[in-house]
Structure formats: C-alpha cells, structure tokens
C-alpha cells in the first residue's frame, strides 16, 4: 500500500506532467559527466533521473519541477532549463533526446 506522501507525489507528477508537457524543467549538464555522485537520484521524489552512461539525465515527462536535485548536486551541474549556462546549452537537447 502507498503511503500518503507517495500517493500525493504520484498525483502531483501526473498533474505536473500534463501542465508542463514539452518543457524540460531541470537539466543535468556535462558537469555531471564522469562524476555521477547520485545524490540527486536519492532525493528525487518521482525517480525521474536516469543513468545515461557517462552522466545522469532527467526525464522531462516525469520531472515535477521540485528542484531538490539541483540543490543536492555536489558539482552544481543541474539547472532549470531557462538558467542553463550558455556553455552547457547542448545539455538541454541531450537530456530531451534520451527520452524521445
């Protein structure tokens, strides 16, 4: 049986997914490559962070835009899609393309 928190998290994930269809929410940049600390995966309430080999990526269809991953990342490699530094702009497409 799901706990109340788990049930609410799942409902919010569905509602947020509908509301933000097509947007990326958070993006993991190349700063993660080779490090893969996994602190972000441990705090993600909807488990939207996946291993893409050299780094983690966030599934835009699952992310609920909570930001826990960004504040937990020890190498500051996670940004809101609108705040990704120019030198890491290609990370937006990389994260999205993994899930197409």
Image (tube, rainbow, N blue to C red):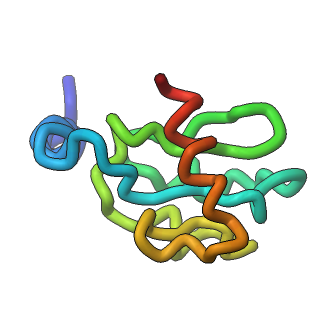
Image coords of residue 80 (percent x, y): 44, 68
Up the image or down, 2 lies above or below 37; here it is: above
Q: How many marks?
A: 0
Q: Along the line of sight, which residue is nearer the eye, 83 or 73? A: 83
Horizontally, residue 14 falls left or right of residue 28, namely left
Task: Give residue 50's quadrant in the image.
Answer: top right
Residue at (51% x, 62% y) in the render: 69
Q: Along the line of sight, which residue is nearer the eye, 88 or 57? A: 88
Residue at (31% x, 59% y) in the render: 65
Horizontally, residue 84 falls left or right of residue 81, namely right
Image coords of residue 64 (percent x, y): 28, 51
Horizontally, residue 57 falls left or right of residue 96, namely right
Task: Give residue 4's quadrant in the image.
Answer: top left
Task: Give residue 52's quadrant in the image.
Answer: top right
Up the image or down, 91 lies above or below 2; here it is: below
Residue at (51% x, 44% y) in the render: 58
Residue at (68% x, 65% y) in the render: 88
Image coords of residue 94 (percent x, y): 62, 42
Quarter the N terminus occupies: top left
Image coords of residue 62 (percent x, y): 34, 37
């Amino acid at each position: 049986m799901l706990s109340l928190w788990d049930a609410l998290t799942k409902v919010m994930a569905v509602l947020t997914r509908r509301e933000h269809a097509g947007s990326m929410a958070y993006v993991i940049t190349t700063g993660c490559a080779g490090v893969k600390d996994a602190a972000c995966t441990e705090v993600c309430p909807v488990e939207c962070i996946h291993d893409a080999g050299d780094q983690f990526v966030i599934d835009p269809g699952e992310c609920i835009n909570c930001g826990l991953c960004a504040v937990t990342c020890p190498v500051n490699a996670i940004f809101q899609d609108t705040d990704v530094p120019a030198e890491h702009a290609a990370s937006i497409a990389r994260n999205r393309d993994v899930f197409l």
